Amino acid sequence: MTKGQKAVTEKYLILPLVLVFVLSIFATIFVLGTHPFRSQPTVFDDEWNDQSRHRLLQNSSSGASKNKLNVTTGAYYYPWHGEDFHNGEGFLRAVLKPRQGPELGEYDDTKKKTIKWHLEFSDMANLDLWVTSWWGPEQITDTTTRDTIMKQVEKEGHPLKIALLYESTNRLRVNREWVLDEDRIKADMKYLTKEYFDHFDNYLRIDGKPVMFIYLTRVLQREGGDHEAGQTLLQKTIALMRKEAKQEIFIVGDHAFDSYPEDVMSSTAALHNSSLQILDGITNYDIYGWMIGQRSSSYPGVDRLNRYYFWHQARWKQIAAEHNCVYIPSVMPGFNDRGVRDSGKVPLSRRLTPTSREGSFFEASLKRALQLVDEKADNLLVVTSFNEWHEDTMIEPVRTQDETTQPESMTDGLAYSGYGTLYLDLLRNYTRDFEEDPMRWSKLMSDYEFE
């Protein structure tokens, strides 16, 4: 055989192999509904669902039935995952070695299958409420909540309640400046009243009023407005919202972050009081910021946790009550945003101390937060978060995987576990076992004196 004949022969032998390889790739995509080189599925078929459901329920200590006492449990829910999960942006668990991804894969929550699973996860965790992130009319967070979540809840006759988290960093800023954009606020409130408050039977109400959470009201309190005249940007914004809603609404502010001043006669105390007078309720979304602060340690520890709940947050509950404002405690499993931001922030471990087990910070937080629930807010407790993967605050199931500390540039040496349904189980167990203690408040007050 000549060199030319050999080259032609090799060419025609290689071409069928290449063709078979390419066809196998397209066959994989067609059959599995996912990219063959992706480590997790983005679409899950009925067989995968059934097998996974059986495995999850077998491994979970909770099951999917209800048995809960008098506490209302909510979680911040992020309905911003589309075909590319969230604009193809990263998250910590995607870069761990080995990778730890969502139990459902990098899902699309515009799909009803995803919402059906998340409703089942919520049942497993005793979750009564999703506080869904809202970034404006016809944004993905709006259309997913309105057209997928609410319709699926109605179709199933599911008891889950929905409230909105009004994302102030998007709705109340123009060119990164906090402003009173009257036209935008008027349009937003008209839209929310029509599409949510007056439309959806399962929309959360307290005292018969539709509830709306507002992110970073504490920032609105100090940014803009005329403080000397007693007209902060927050006061102006809330007044306009109430006027345009054309009905009474129950506004919960993300407010209980800074420490309330020891000097109750100070101008700072007066500023806080003016905000409490116009809000119906307060909570704190950002537990991380207070728990870590300027510290270099990633482990919260028992002493700091006690101080946060039994001094800092208990103080806010007391002051809020004095202004006829309810208080809603919150819990967080941990925090690490290095997968999406080069922020240099110290991560918050999911372990209370270096020798504690996975989930111990969340468990210890639940024990304390449950002692602070407010009966005037239907004993509501809120979790940050159900599925905020960017900041690794999620409690939804992660595929079971051995713990890892790699790469340390992302973990800061902390151990991360593929925890399965652990956080659903913890939430269910502690809300199931919760018993009201009429003396709990006086006990807290005597054990943790306010300075």
Image (cartoon, helix red, strand yellow):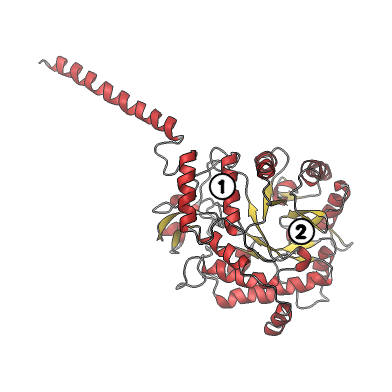
CA gap between label 1 and label 2 equals 28 Å
Rendered residue at 73%/81% (across/down): 442
In which image quadrant can residue 287 be found? bottom right
Q: Position of residue 188 (x, y in %)?
A: 79, 43
Query: In the image shown, does 310 or 374 lie closer to the viewer?
Result: 374
Res. 425 visible in picture? yes
Look at label 2 and name its amino acid: Val
**Count of marks placed on residues:** 2
Q: Is label 2 in a helix, a strand or a loop?
A: strand
Q: Is label 1 in a helix, a strand or a loop?
A: helix
Q: Position of residue 77 (x, y in %)?
A: 63, 51
In which image quadrant can residue 86 be found? top right
- Eyeballing the image, is 435 above or below 246? below
Query: In the image shown, does 106 or 257 lie closer to the viewer?
Result: 106
Rendered residue at 60%/73% (across/down): 305
- Eyeballing the image, is 333 above or below 237? below
Mark carried by residue 252? 2
Q: Residues within 10 Å of mark 2 (few under 14, many from 20)?
A: many
Q: Residues within 10 Å of mark 1 (few under 14, many from 20)?
A: some
What residue is disc 1 on? 117
Query: In the image shown, does 433 or 350 lie closer to the viewer?
Result: 433
- Name the quadrant of the N terminus: top left
Rendered residue at 52%/41% (across/down): 88
Q: Earlier in the sequence, mark 1 or mark 2?
A: 1
Res. 44 visible in picture? no
Q: Position of residue 141 (x, y in %)?
A: 66, 43
Look at label 1 and name its amino acid: Trp
- Name the quadrant of the C terminus: bottom right
Whether residue 119 sits left or right of residue 450 in the image: it is: left
